[in-house]
Amino acid sequence: MANAYKKSEPIGNNLLRALRSDDWEILQPSLEQWSAPAGTLLHEPGDAVRYAYFPRGSAMISYLVALSDGRAIETALIGREGAVGGIVSQGRLPAYTRAEVQVGGSFFRIDLHHLEEAKSRSLSLRHLFARYADCLMAQLFQSVACSAAHSIEQRTARWLLAATERTGAGNLTLTQEQLAAMLGVGRSYMSRVIRDLRQRDCIETGRGRLAVRNPAGLRSLACECNAAVSRHFNDVLEGVYPAEKSVAGSRGVPLGKAQ
């Protein structure tokens, strides 16, 4: 479902909040408000990427690499700090990965033809999105290192922290099977990890949901990967990565003059 954006409504995406006021005026007329539930596929490998998506508030999108055995392994989690799809590419290139809505909600989307037209009018807009692409690449690099070097317990704690920082909420609509699949581990192993986190009073679980109750406890168990990505974001795009205590629906830290 898509409809026009009204200037009186909050932006809800930190990357867009970082735009200069003149760049916001260029981009804003082409932005559509769009909503989708969890599980919505934005594109599959080989599809022509038609839109760029900017998650708003607590919405999140996962990049997933589909394997021949049917598994889909998450490589990046994108929330209100970023965007998905053709941000720095030229034209509608084929997708390499699957992009799927992880937490449903509200998004901005923009047709890539309109995005390319906007970037052709503003060097600073191109530079901002290029810096974001650098941050996304850092996240991918860190994800590869994390999968190779850290335990499932550390990776699970890191994922839960990353998700709560991006959504600004402690409650996640997520099953153990989904989490296990995204991290590329067996369900029985994940069940043991979840049970241990529950016994440590870090999380609570229910039917189809998981609630983080003790972020500090999770942080003590997690690897350093999430903090490393956050530091790089702050070096390259200060204020765009959500702060630990940010609230769902926050408009982020205003770096430019967009309102």
Image (cartoon, helix red, strand yellow):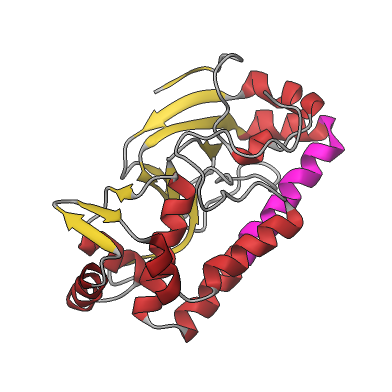
Question: Can residue 48 be seen at all in this image of the molecule?
Answer: yes
Residue drawn at (58%, 30%), measured in percent from left and top?
A: 110
| Observer-nearest of 230 and 95 | 230
Tell me where residue 71 sits by quadrant. Answer: bottom left
Residue drawn at (45%, 27%), measured in percent from left and top?
A: 34
Left or right: 128, with 66 as reference point: right
The outermost residue toward the left is 207
Q: Position of residue 202 (x, y in %)?
A: 30, 65
Q: Is residue 150 above or below residue 115?
A: below
The range drawn in magenta is: 121-138
Tell me where residue 212 sits by quadrant. Answer: bottom left
User: How many labels, in total?
Assistant: 0
Q: Position of residue 99 (x, y in %)?
A: 44, 50
Image quarter in which the C terminus is found: top right
Q: Position of residue 209 (x, y in %)?
A: 22, 51
| Observer-nearest of 45 and 125 | 125
- Magenta segment: does it hold 174? no
| Observer-nearest of 213 and 59 | 213
Magenta stretch: helix, strand or loop mostly: helix
Image quarter in which the N terminus is found: top left
- Magenta segment: does it hold 137? yes
Q: Position of residue 131 (x, y in %)?
A: 74, 52
Q: Is residue 119 above or below residue 175?
A: above
Left or right: 118, with 165 as reference point: right
